[in-house]
Every structure is written in structure tokens, then in C-alpha cells.
Amino acid sequence: MRAISDLHISYTENRDIVAALKPESPDDWLIVAGDVGELMADVEWALTLLRDRFAQVIWVPGNHELWTVQRDPDQRRGVERYEALVAMCRRLGVLTPEDPYPVWTGPGGPVRIAPLFLLYDYTFLAPGTTTREESLAKAHEAGIVCTDEYYLHPDPYPSRQDWCAARVAYSEQRLTEVAGDLPLVLVNHWPLVRRPTEIMTHQEFVQWCGTVRTADWHTRFDVCASVYGHLHIPRSTVYDGVPFEEVSLGYPREWRRFGLRSDLARQIVPRPEGFTA
């Protein structure tokens, strides 16, 4: 079972990379941890292609899929847009955070895959601030403001943080229901803990990267791996004995700096040979 995120196929170079992605075996699963693209048609193109190649595709939304941009003929917003994406995935046979958590029974299994959609609530405050208002003001002063502020609408929720609270409560209940059954692979576009963001150059941006509400999920539940993207800093780390995998492709200007990784679709289960937590 492999994972990738932040495909950003609005860039021709990235679209070509996605077009070349292939499984290692006919039985391989692929986790797509968000930010396929901004246009509904682009998301459908990529997920259809990957669905046709991998035995099972599991998708969670990133912030870019939830944007409502002028160039997209589909102008649905907020929850309605998310539900339209889920309906698209169901037509394609792609699993989402709204489906029963599937069980991987291949090498390294059995493990249960829990795709999540949690958003963020500005509780990863910018350094030197103590409130959301101060944190946002500091970001605006620095000129480091996430585009979500303009294109990611929370309708019908009054705010993105209210939508986040609802998603966290929903996901927490579902995880509690399966706790103690099988080891879990948690999949969310945004990291579940703040620690991966500590190496980011612009700490003002961190407030758009997660929520403190999930800080103990990797230890509270029987988690064997946590998969995420969003940061565009692909790497493997371990927190409290649990592997965290940032699996993003990122923008061409980013991956060109070091060249494409050999493990673009990173192996999650079984753990790669030589890995120790």
C-alpha cells in the first residue's frame, strides 16, 4: 500500500507525472492525501486514471479541492462542494472519509485505513501570539496569508473553525467505534500534530496547517502510521513511536530543486525494509 499527496495537476509537469504513476503490483492500493487540483474536472481525471491502475484508491480532500475558483464551471461551495466530491468518488469506486474504513489484508496487514477530513481551526498560533485574531494579524503584516481565506468557503458553517470542530467530532466518534480492533493508518491532508510544521520557513502559515484537537490521536488510538501532505516537505518522521509520512509531490518549482523522489508513491504498509520506529 502506497501514498501520495499534493499532486497539483493544474501544472502540466505534475499532470505528466500523475499520468506516469503505476502500481508496483496489480494488488497495490494507493492513498491520495488531498490537493489533487482546484477544478472538479481535474480531480475526476486524476482519480479516474489512478482508479484504473490501482486495485483500490482512497482519497481525502485537501484545501485546494475545496476552493471555489472563478475558472471552475462548478461553483458549489463549502459542504456542498465536499459532498459533490464524495459523490464523484463513489461513482468512480474511490473510497472517502464518508465510507466504512477499509481493511488492507496484503503484506504487512491486516490494518485498517481511516481516511479523515478535519480541516484546521487556527489553533496552531503564529509565534508570539496568543489569540486567533493576533495570529491572523501577524500573518497579514508579514504578507503570509493562505489563499483559503479567499476561496475556501465554510458554508453553511459560520467559519472554517466551526466546520473543523464538526469534522473532528464526527471523526473522533468513528475512530472510537473501531478502536482496539486493528492497527490504524490515519490519513488526513493536514498533519495531526504541530511538530512537523516546526521546520517551515514561514511560521505565520502554520495556523492553516491543523488543529490542536488531534494532538493525541496517534497515541490515543492504536496507530501504526499517520499519512499527511499539505506542507510540501516530503519526509518520514517518528513521534511517540508512531511513523508520520509527509507524501506530497508539491509544485514544480519545489520538486525541481532536488529532483523527483524515487518513492513518489511512498510505501506505507508494510514498512520499508530497514525502517525502525
Image: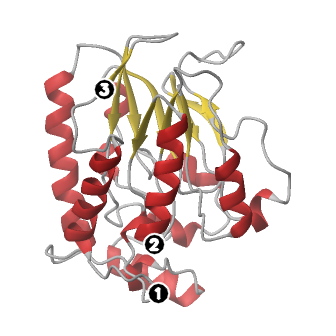
SS assignment at label 2: loop
- Quick check: marks 3 and 1 in contact, CB under 8 Å? no
Q: Position of residue 61 (x, y in %)?
A: 38, 56
Q: Which residue is drawn at the image coordinates 17% and 34% (left, top)?
A: 174
Q: Which residue is mark 2?
A: 39
User: Which callout, 3 or 2, points to the residue nearer the camera?
Assistant: 2
Q: Amino acid at mark 3?
A: Pro
Q: Position of residue 219 (x, y in %)?
A: 36, 26
The answer to whether 165 appears left or right of 65 in the picture is: left
Q: Which residue is drawn at the image coordinates 38% and 34% (left, top)?
A: 186
Going from N to C along the chain, the mark reached first, 3 or 2, is 2
Gap in Å between the C-alphas at discs 3 and 2?
Answer: 27 Å
Q: Position of residue 156 (x, y in %)?
A: 13, 75
Q: Which residue is mark 3?
A: 102
Going from N to C along the chain, the mark reached first, 3 or 1, is 1
Q: How many marks?
A: 3
Gap in Å between the C-alphas at discs 2 and 1?
Answer: 8 Å
- Quick check: marks 2 and 1 in contact, CB under 8 Å? yes
Residue 39 seen anywhere in this rendered image of the structure = yes
Q: Position of residue 169 (x, y in %)?
A: 15, 47
Q: Which mark is residue 95?
A: none
User: Which callout, 3 or 1, points to the residue nearer the camera?
Assistant: 1
Disc 2 crowd, CA 10 A, few/some/many (<14, 14-19, 20+): many
Going from N to C along the chain, the mark reached first, 2 or 1, is 2
Q: Which residue is mark 1?
A: 71
Vertically, is 190 above or below 82?
above
Q: How is the image coloured?
A: secondary structure
Q: Which residue is drawn at the image coordinates 53% and 57% (left, top)?
A: 230
Q: Nearer the viewer, residue 191 or 135?
A: 191
Q: Nearer the viewer, residue 51 or 115?
A: 51
Q: Amino acid at mark 2?
A: Leu
